[in-house]
Image (tube, rainbow, N blue to C red):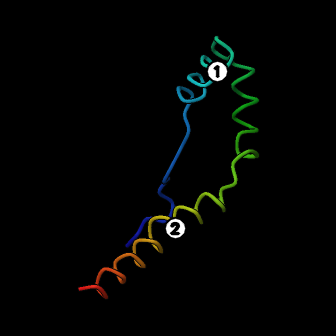
Amino acid sequence: MIDTSKIIYSINIEDVQSVAEQELERELGEKELKIIENKIGDYIDWYEAINMAIIDNIVTRRTTRKQKRGKE
């Protein structure tokens, strides 16, 4: 049985600090990290990200396999 509560993708503090270093040339402080933690989900279109992953990796693969079978 599939564990439906399993996390598929996550962003950690190291990821955020890496971007801050590249963009701001410094790490974020505790208060700044809390702001990002509370707001980052507002900037990610979860539905579209999931939908595109399905289309690109499930639907497209299925179509490609069917096309290859048809050529054989």
Residue at 37 percent across and 73 percent down: it is 1
Which residue in the protein does label 2 denote? 54
Looking at the picture, how far across and down is residue 38, in whole percent?
A: 74, 37
Identity of the residue drawn at 56% across and 23% down: 18
**What is the quadrant of residue 43 in the picture?**
top right
| Residue 32 placement (x, y as % from top left) | 74, 22
* Helix, strand or loop under label 2: helix
Q: Residue at x 31, y 88 (%)?
A: 70
Q: Residue 13 appears at what percent x and percent y?
A: 57, 28
Inspect the image, locate mark 1, and give the three-letter code of the amino acid beneath it.
Ala
Residue 29 % position (x, y):
69, 15
Q: Is residue 30 above or below residue 55?
A: above
Q: Residue at x 69, y 34 (%)?
A: 37
Please state the total of marks drawn on the protein image: 2
Q: Is residue 37 above or below residue 14?
A: below
Secondary structure category for the residue under label 1: helix
10 or 58, which is in the foreground?
Answer: 58
- For disc 1, the neighbor class at 10 Å (few under 14, some 14 to 19, many from 20) is some
Q: To which residue does mark 1 refer?
A: 20
Image quadrant where residue 11 sits: top right
